[in-house]
Amino acid sequence: MADYAISEYVAAWATSPFANNDLPPWLVVQKAELLVRDVLKTVGQGYRVEGEFAIHQSSTVEAGALLKGPGIIGPRCLVAAGSYLRGGIYLAENCIIGPSSEVKTSFMFSGSKIAHLNFVGDSIIGSGVNIEAGAIIANYRNELADKTIRIMFNDEIIDTGVTKFGALIGDDVRIGANAVVAPGALIPPRGQVARLQLLDQYPR
């Protein structure tokens, strides 16, 4: 199994509705809208459907949050005022999206929290992850002429072949306030990114 297999970082992936998908994470997020739409067809009782979003009845979506599907919000989640979810979203149970945060094309697993004033793009976030205020998970190499995302990992260069990918964030990771995770990051379980740190795994 590849060292960047999603289930090696996110234990719940193996029992999630996406478990039969063994593509690398940067290809999974390219298919997020399709994958979430397929799961939307199978949501059970306890969900209300608003447009292309299925929201569990035990979850709270505060006034002023904007949801652009497809998306699924699982049990006991909080999506706070001013937040923006779009482009293929999956939240498992007990997730928090704090005020004025944007989450695009991402999967987020049990008990993970995005504080407020955050951006998370094209990413897979494990269980028990805490992303403090102002932290950014960037998804696009705006500064480079060649936008293809490449990752230096275990002394090898991974050429993802895609131009939009944020991060694969393992279970129980902590990302400090105002940190920036540059596009194409693989953060193992229980990893830490310090406050104000730049984590950039692009080969130099």
Image (cartoon, grey):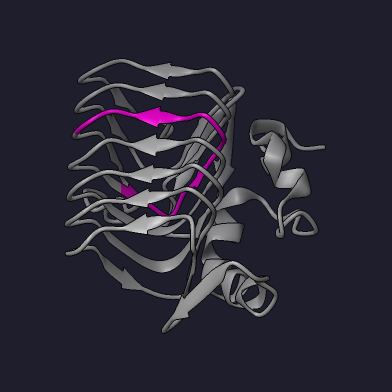
Q: Quadrant of the N terminus?
A: top right
Q: Viewed as shown, does residue 8 lie left or right of 154?
A: right
Image quarter of residue 115: top left
The reply to whether residue 5 is in sight is: no
Q: Is residue 184 magenta?
A: no
Figure check: 106 above or below 50? above
Relative image position of residue 127 (x, y in whole percent): 56, 34
Relative image position of residue 117 (x, y in whole percent): 17, 42
| Residue drawn at 64 percent across, 32 percent down | 9
Q: Viewed as shown, does residue 200 lie left or right of 40?
A: left
Q: Viewed as shown, does residue 107 lie left or right of 100?
A: right
Q: Nearer the viewer, residue 17 or 189?
A: 17
| Residue drawn at 57 percent across, 31 percent down | 170
Figure check: 107 above or below 193? below
Relative image position of residue 157 (x, y in whole percent): 56, 36
Q: Nearer the viewer, residue 199 or 112?
A: 112
The reply to whether residue 17 is in sight is: yes
| Residue drawn at 68 percent across, 70 percent down | 44
Q: Quadrant of the C terminus?
A: top left
Q: Is residue 122 magenta?
A: yes
| Residue drawn at 19 percent across, 55 percent down | 81
Q: Nearer the viewer, residue 154 or 204?
A: 154
Q: Which residues are magenta?
A: 120-133
Figure check: 131 above or below 148? above
Relative image position of residue 119 (x, y in whole percent): 26, 47
Image quarter of residue 82: bottom left
